[in-house]
Image (cartoon, rainbow, N blue to C red):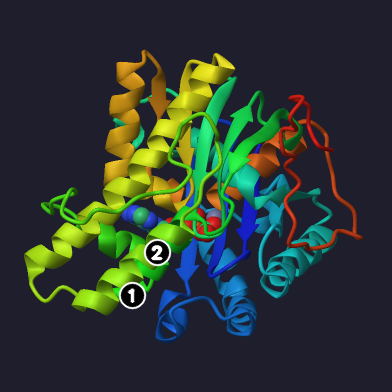
Amino acid sequence: MRVLGIESSCDETGAAIVDDAGRVLSDVVQSQVKLHAPYGGVIPELASRDHLKNVGPVVREALARAEMTLAEIDGIAVTNRPGLVGALLVGVQIAKGLAWSLGKPLVSVDHLVGHLLAVFLRRTNASESGSEPPSFPFVALLASGGHTAIYRVDGPHARNMRELGGTRDDAAGEAFDKVGKLLGLGYPGGPLIDKLAQGGNPHAAPLTLPMGRTRSFEFSFSGIKTQIAQLVRNHGIPKTESGMADLCASFQSAVTSVLAKKLVAAALRERVSTIVLGGGVAANRELRARTSNLAAEHGLRAVLPELASCTDNAAMIAYAGLIRLANNERDGWDLIATSATSLPRMTRKGRGAR
Ligand code: KG4
Ligand code: ZN
């Protein structure tokens, strides 16, 4: 089966074609980063308009790169939640139009499910990375610009996924971006801080993270942003390269250590032997290293998605949709777009909240 995935939940317009084995036959991402950079964050109205302009060409390019025609596609998967509703509507509407005109099945995908399954994607030329996909159950950390939470994943469907704990305020990626803005680095801050932190002293700035204890799987990242804002207010933005490296390293070390520790603690509590990363922050070098090292220390297996599978892409949506299609699930013409996720939280009694 080969499925066309369409993604437009935030500031990337994506189209991709993926097969049953998770092989990525094509994956096209048109980023809006430059459009939103002057504002230091995503402007929803601008995002919707840009998706509208780009979604057609992006779909056409995904077909061309896979050397396929629309007639050869077995189904269409589209992100319909959570995200900016105006942005989601663009992808949902083109997916409906294509499915209708081609007589192909249509399935919606929760963007968070896409991130949690991104680790199953196999990109051409990267298969020599050799890491086998994880088996269920696993515990996953999803850390992106919009979400940060730990999930227990018992299978590939949304109904098999339960949030064990999430952020009470900012998402981890949002914290990277806000700190990037405070330090005058530009947008998005995550990849820039990742680069600048290399060689910096992670103990240079005394930063504390609330909710750092590993018994709770909740996070809070707004306080560390305020600490950096105060440092900048009192001492200014570091003027030397090494000063900037030290501050970036201190911030990144504080954030990634709490993420990795809680992920491992959650797996140990759930008695699950595999841990997985997902979301844009999963591309962070320090988080990847810490997760692998801590997993090894505790006898756990860490499976990390390839870098191109971490940030928003349509391949993960195509794959999650393919799983639904293979299970004979379909969506109808009344499909809507919404800002809410379909994934339930674990209640105190350990049952799903749905
Ligand atoms: O998953 P994603 O592309 O979009 C959302 O679903 O939010 O994640 C984007 C986020 C941004 O906040 C970006 O700064 C962060 O992921 N990010 C990183 C890195 N690459 C992207 N954060 C830290 N280190 C990175 N290397
Ligand atoms: Zn995302």
Q: Residue at x 30, y 31 (%)?
A: 129
Q: CA distance from mark 2 to mark 1?
A: 9 Å
Q: Is mark 2 within 8 Å of ligand 1?
A: no
Q: Is mark 1 within 8 Å of ligand 1?
A: no
Q: Pick the residue in front: 255 or 81.
A: 255
Residue 248: x and y in percent read 23, 59
Q: Residue at x 13, y 51 (%)?
A: 201
* Residue type beneath disc 2: Lys
Answer yes or no: do the residues labelled 2 and 1 have beta carbons within 8 Å?
yes
- Return the residue at label 1: 182
228 w.r.t. 158: above or below: below
- Most distant residue in the front direction: 234
The quadrant of the picture showing ligand 2 is bottom right
335 w.r.t. 84: above or below: above
* Residue type beneath disc 1: Leu
Q: Pick the residue in front: 352 or 100.
A: 352
Q: Pick the residue in front: 179 or 313.
A: 179
Q: Does dot 2 land on a helix, a strand or a loop? A: helix
Q: Count how many numbered circles sit on residues in the image.
A: 2
Residue 1: x and y in percent read 66, 36
Quadrant of residue 272 in the image?
A: top right
Q: Quadrant of the C terminus?
A: top right
Q: Residue at x 45, y 37 (%)?
A: 277
- Return the residue at label 2: 225
Quadrant of residue 173 in the image?
A: bottom left
164 w.r.t. 134: above or below: below
Residue 94: x and y in percent read 73, 68
Q: Is residue 279 left or right of residue 354?
A: left
Q: Is residue 63 visible?
A: no
